[in-house]
Amino acid sequence: MANFRISVINGDGIGPEVAVEGLKVLHTLGAKCGHTFSTKDYLAGGAALDATGVPLPDDTVKGVKDSDALLFGAIGGPKWENLPHHLKPEAGLLKLRKELDAWANLRPAVVFDELADASSLKPEVLKGTDIMVLRELTGGIYFGLPRGIDGSGPNRRGFNTEVYHEYEIERIVRMAFQIALGRRKKVCSVDKANVLESSQVWREVAIRVGKEFPQVALSHMYVDNAAMQLVRDPKQFDVIVTGNIFGDILSDEASQLTGSIGMLASASVGGPVGFFEPIHGSAPDIAGQQKANPLAMIGTLSLLLRYGLKLDQEAALIDRAIRKVLQDGLRTGDIKQPGLPILTTTQMGDAVVERLKAL
Ligand code: NAD
């Protein structure tokens, strides 16, 4: 039994609609397991711009840093699209990510048997897929120096630098092994060591850290092959760990295996406070219509419990409740199937709460 302080940023569009369902599930879990989750709301994105004139008020940063974890809905929308760059909702999100110094991005890609038909790949290829992609988030070519554009005429050039220090590789690879210990005990480190020196160092460090985890099988794959294997035979993967740019691409590819964006959760951790959010945006096209699927947000809650608060058993209960609503044939519009009723956002949240109570 414990008390946890969760900061909540509802955000814009469907953000508040799915966040309210996530919190319903969180408080049900608290009552069931004897924990108290004290939640506190903060502003960011369009809602913050409307209320305070900036996309990320200082007290949001301060409050979030003073909590145990952040649950984030989604931000943005047409209303704020034409503001200058530094005032756009996205500028607030990037600043918050930077403030929280999260160097590891976790993206599970789980194919539920009941939804295997929703993907563009064949169900028999997909069934049983359960991958955790770990992407390094604060290093690599997106941040490396020098970078820029110089010269003129035909000699004008753009350039970036892919650079990885051993300490950056070591910490994320170690996290991958630790996560794999609680899963199927396989880590695939993805690089381009046949061409890039930064990848050569990546691979050497992965092998060195791997020696600390003899129970976990380590394999290596070049990124081009990994992109191919993900669609050829995704079931072969358990944990994938890779650098920033490769992870950016592969995590999106892996998420497409699962069908709907309304099912996908993510976590950014490594800093003092973890940042937990569904991967979808504010979906202005369906906002305010009770059409949003809250399962991405509820799945995000499971990541928050497992990787933010170290509450593995509680996270497993949420996972089971999600699986149960799907087994029971409950669907929102984005995952609709012939012959099954379509639930509203609130009805889907209620259904998860009911299943959770019954577990
Ligand atoms: P989006 O993810 O909001 O929507 C893409 C499509 O998926 C839409 O058709 C939408 O209806 C659907 N969708 C998204 N989430 C859903 C859910 N839970 N249930 C059912 N359907 C769902 O992406 P977009 O349309 O490119 O962006 C809309 C706004 O969101 C933009 O302002 C963008 O900048 C912002 N955005 C924010 C974040 C974030 O807050 N982290 C991430 C991506 C985009």
Image (cartoon, grey):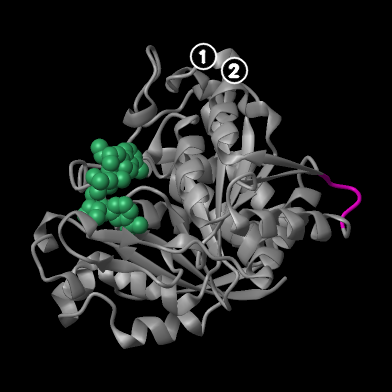
Quadrant of the snapshot with the N terminus: bottom right
Which residues make up the magenta segment? 213-217
Point out residue 284 in the picture as x, y percentages from the top left corner.
Answer: 19, 48
Closer-to-camera residue (295/168): 168
Task: Answer few, some or many: residues within 10 Å of disc 1's Cα (few below 14, many 20 plus, some between 14 and 19).
Answer: few
Q: Name the foreground residue: 332 vs 124.
A: 124
- Residue labelled with disc 1: 122
Q: Is residue 72 left or right of residue 14?
A: right
Helix or strand or loop: what does disc 1 sit on? loop
- On screen, 147 above or below 176? below
Residue 151, image quadrant: bottom left
Classified by dominant secondary structure, the portion drawn in magenta counts as loop
Judge from the rendering whether residue 184 lies leftward or rightward of residue 212; answer left or right.
left
Residue under the point 52% across and 21% down: 116
Which one is in front, 197 or 268? 197
Identify residue for label 2.
Answer: 125
Q: Amino acid at mark 1?
A: Lys
Residue 28 showing in the rendered view? no
Asked whether 80 or 318 is in front, the reply is: 80
Residue type at mark 2?
Val
Residue shown at the point (71%, 60%) measured from the top left: 175
In the depicted structure, whether residue 288 falls above or below residue 37: above
Residue shown at 68% from the left, 72% from the top: 167
